[in-house]
Amino acid sequence: MVVSLIVGVLFIGGACGYLFASSYPMNWSVLQQSSDQDLNQEVLEIKNSLIQKGFPKEILEDLKEEDILACKGATQVFTEVSYEPMSDEEYYSEEKIWGIQVTSIGVQLSGKSERYRIFHHFLWRADAKFYGTECIKVSPTSEIADYDAGWTMGSDITGQVLYTKNQTNYVSPYHSIEIKREDEYDTSDIFNGFPVQRVHKLDTLATFSMPRGGTNYRGYMTYSIKELKKGYMVISWFNYTHQTTPFQYPVMTAKESEKTFTLGKTNFYTSQTEFWILGSKWKDAKRKSL
């Protein structure tokens, strides 16, 4: 009797979690894609310059005009493509047809100090199944308080998510973008004689939900970064947390799951991609891990 009651409570709780807390409200609209003739002349010139330098054309089509304008004065484009599993089944599969393609792009900008515009773009390759909430976390090069920080991040982080249905593209802003700064203490090297380091950790969390019945699910986040001291690498981490099941109890969002990093999760899967750019005087570069 007691066991049946417990099972019933868990079932009802899971069902309520699925029905009432299953997704974020999104503001979807048809993507208005302009032809090159309709584009602002400055946007068109920047776009063509980026393509010539190696910026993937298909990703440029997903960008907002202001994010293209933020690449004005581009001198170089660095691109890296990786494929990430989005479930345990994909991770252990011998076929290695992993869920998402992550394209990380660094656009070096002209100026007295070294500057970059960083892009992380994701594209679902496998048969995407969405059950509720999704979360992206972007963590740029850390800032070390006890030493001169190599890079600093701007506050202009932005992006959007997209999908295709019946040959029509739809776009929405993220449900929320949260920039979180907090201090942590890194003790990983104290046994090697190095002092405890106080780390100013900076994370950006973006939440969203995807509708069912579409294809070509994708999105991106972008931000600026500026050099403070030569000899440091640019490192940008991109975490994608995906809900893998419709039922869960107790109810948790992908954002909450991303923050917990609990081993043995069954309702969410988090993949991580690292993007590195060697800064000027890279031979003396120092890696500062988050």
Image (spheres, rainbow, N blue to C red):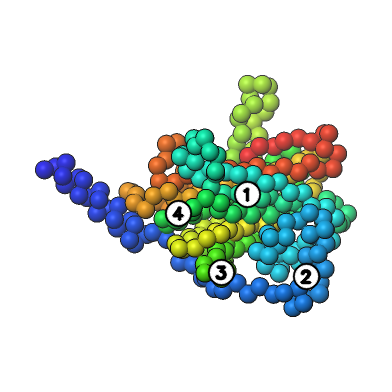
What residue sits right under mark 3 in the picture?
167
Kindly report the distance in space between the C-alpha atoms of the residues bearing marks 3 and 2.
25 Å
Question: Upstream in the sequence, badge 3 or badge 2?
Answer: 2
Q: Residue furthest right?
A: 112
Question: Upstream in the sequence, badge 1 or badge 3?
Answer: 1
What residue sits right under mark 4 in the picture?
129
The secondary element bearing badge 4 is classed as loop
Left or right of 238? Residue 44 is right
Report the disc number at residue 43: 2
Structural crowding at the residue carrying mark 4, measured as other residues with C-alpha within 10 Å and reported as few (<14), some (14–19) or many (≥20): some
What residue sits right under mark 1 in the picture?
102
Question: Upstream in the sequence, badge 4 or badge 2?
Answer: 2
Structural crowding at the residue carrying mark 3, measured as other residues with C-alpha within 10 Å and reported as few (<14), some (14–19) or many (≥20): few
Question: Upstream in the sequence, badge 2 or badge 1?
Answer: 2
Question: Upstream in the sequence, badge 1 or badge 4?
Answer: 1
Left or right of 247? Residue 8 is left
Q: Nearer the viewer, mark 1 or mark 3?
A: 3
> What residue do we see at 54% from left, 43% from top?
97
Kindly report the distance in space between the C-alpha atoms of the residues bearing marks 1 and 4.
18 Å
> What residue do we see at 20% from left, 49% from top?
8
Observer-nearest of 111 and 10? 10
The secondary element bearing badge 2 is classed as helix
